[in-house]
Amino acid sequence: MISVLIAAILRLMMDPFIGERAAYLPFTLVVLITVLWCGPGPALLTSVLSLCFGFLFAQSESVGMSELVQSTLFLATAGGIITVGEIANTYRRKLIQTNLESQRRAEQFAQAAEELNLLIDGTPGLAIYMLDPSGRVVIWNKGAQRLSGWSEEEALGKHTSIFYPAPLLAAGRPETDLAQARSEGRIEGEGWRLHKDGTTFLAAFSITALYDEKGSLRGFAEIVSDITRRRADENALLARESLLTSILSTVPDAMVVIDAHGVILSFSDAAQTMFGYEAQEVVGRNISILMPAPDCHRHDLYLRRYLETGEKRIIGKGRVVFAQRKNGTTFPVTLSIGEARDGEQHIFTGFLQDLTERLQAEERLESLQSELIHVSRISAMGAMASTLAHELNQPIAAVVNYVQAAHNQIAGPQDWDLAAMREALDDAARNALRAGQIVRRLRAFVTMGTVERTVETLPSVINEACALALMGAREQGVHTYFDLGPDALTVLADRIQIQQVIINLIRNACEAMADSAERRLRIEAHPYGTEFARVTISDSGCGIAPAIHDQLFKAFSSTKPDGMGLGLSICRTIIEAHEGKIWLETREGRGTSFHFTLPRAK
């Protein structure tokens, strides 16, 4: 609007000179300026106002053909100006937008380049620099300065060979590395490099050939890091591992390492010898392959219970268990388990010692001791018989004499000497009592031993006894099943005597199954009421006839052709000395179960 008024004033000022001619000329320039600065809308409005002022400056009393032609030409010219001006505005806006976008990208590129330089310069322990195609330094970061000791001013323009020690220079290694990178695109390796002070360091390096879009070589990017200390630490670690491995390989005990899922991680040489497996056969498999039933089915449950509750039952303790070789045979071992943690990972290490030879030696020793005790008993019985004969000879002879004297008195005349007869009978009674006292004193001498009872864990007592009693049972086809109840089941007992009872009952059970097609031995231990614990040993033999049940626990009573009949009698004596009881249940043709009880520890 203002521009139209200004144009009108200028036209008015020019009117004395041009008159009615060029009535619309100043307004054409106004339309052009308006469309360029304000756009097509204001330019249209300017055109209409300019048309009105043009009629005024035409100074005609009526509108003729000439005025219409001028008005039409002005409107057409204004329309053309508006169209061209809008096209110019569109290109101008695009140009401005393009310039702004280019400026923004330039700023982003500058910021990214600055951040990249900061990143490269701030990378600790890494020297990052660029070489031209001839191998001379063109870019040198601060990491390279820290690592090598050369400043940027000192390194720029220098050939990469200054970083190689003399032996590598003599071998032409700098040129070889660049040629290899040029042909392969990228190489990585390790080698010795030089500090500025002449000292060397072991470096890990990578050299990458850089090509432009046309495939022309622009240079090389090289990254170098000092790995001297890391390699020394690795070598020291390998040396320690080698030393540890050599030590463990000489340890006679087998070592097996598992994770929290029971998967075998390590299997020592001694373990390979003990079980008959190669390490590669068992590593990655579950530890249960080294266990007989029922432990192989329960181990994962025991492991999961410990991880959930944290309750240690066998970790840090030694115990006697049975293990299973690759060929299926079982053997007793002492097992000690330790735990370690690698972050959140649980690692369990088991040390196993084969008890086979030791138990065989103990069994031979026990056999010799039994024979010695048997001989000693026979000798003692002979000595006892001689003692009894000697000690009882006088009182029995006196009894006979006194009774014979009384008999003679009775057989004589009727005038009996009652006082003499009474005296003879009294003396006979005293000597008979004396003989009884001799027998009681000898019996007390024989049975004067006492039972030394201590608090014992019943499953542990049974396991140790089974380790000896079941020697060779697997080879005889006997399958043993355990149900030993809680590990916390404790009793008050003489450990050795109770184990002797268990061994005797297990061996009797194995002998009873010698002719059976199916040989199953079951050993159980459970609470029996609140005061006692009960141990049950069951076999799948032919059973025992009910008629001889009451005779089995008496001395010199046996169902074996060559048995002495003392085993079960001794078992009953031991159990009763522990304030328990022993009995049997039989299913004729289907096996026998022997039970005995022991007082629980309070």
Image (tube, helix red, strand yellow):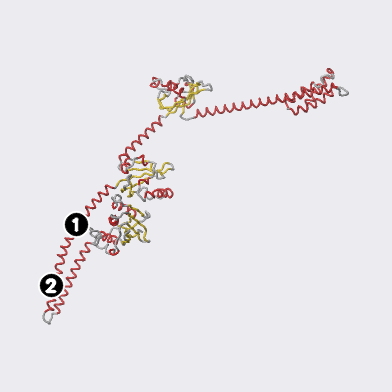
Q: Secondary structure at mark 1?
A: helix
Decide if residue 398 is on the left or right side of residue 290. Answer: left
Per the image, the residue denoted by label 1 is: 376
Per the image, the residue denoted by label 2 is: 401
Q: Which of the 4 image quadrants contains residue 402?
A: bottom left
Rendered position, 408 above or below 272: below
Estimate the x, y position of residue 286 in percent, counting from the top left.
Answer: 39, 44
Estimate the x, y position of residue 15 in percent, counting from the top left.
Answer: 84, 19
Instruction: Give the farthest residue toward the left.
Output: 413
Estimate the x, y position of residue 457 in percent, counting from the top left.
Answer: 34, 54
Q: CA distance from mark 2 to mark 1?
A: 37 Å
Instruction: Give the farthest residue toward the front.
Output: 517
Quarter that holds the C terminus: bottom left
Q: What kind of residue is marked 2?
A: Asn
Compare residues 13 and 135 and report the one nearer the observer: 135
Rendered position, 507 above or below 223: below
Query: Upstream in the sequence, badge 2 or badge 1?
Result: 1
Q: Are marks 2 and 1 in contact (CB under 8 Å)?
A: no
Rendered position, 595 above or below 156: below
Q: Secondary structure at mark 2?
A: helix
Rendered position, 320 above or below 551: above
Q: Sort mark 1 into few (<14), some (14-19) or many (20+) by Cα contacts within 10 Å.
A: few
At 25% from the left and 49% from the top, the residue drawn is 361
Estimate the x, y position of residue 314 in percent, counting from the top left.
Answer: 37, 49
At 24% from the left and 52% from the top, the residue drawn is 366
Q: What kind of residue is marked 1?
A: Ser
Numbered label tally: 2
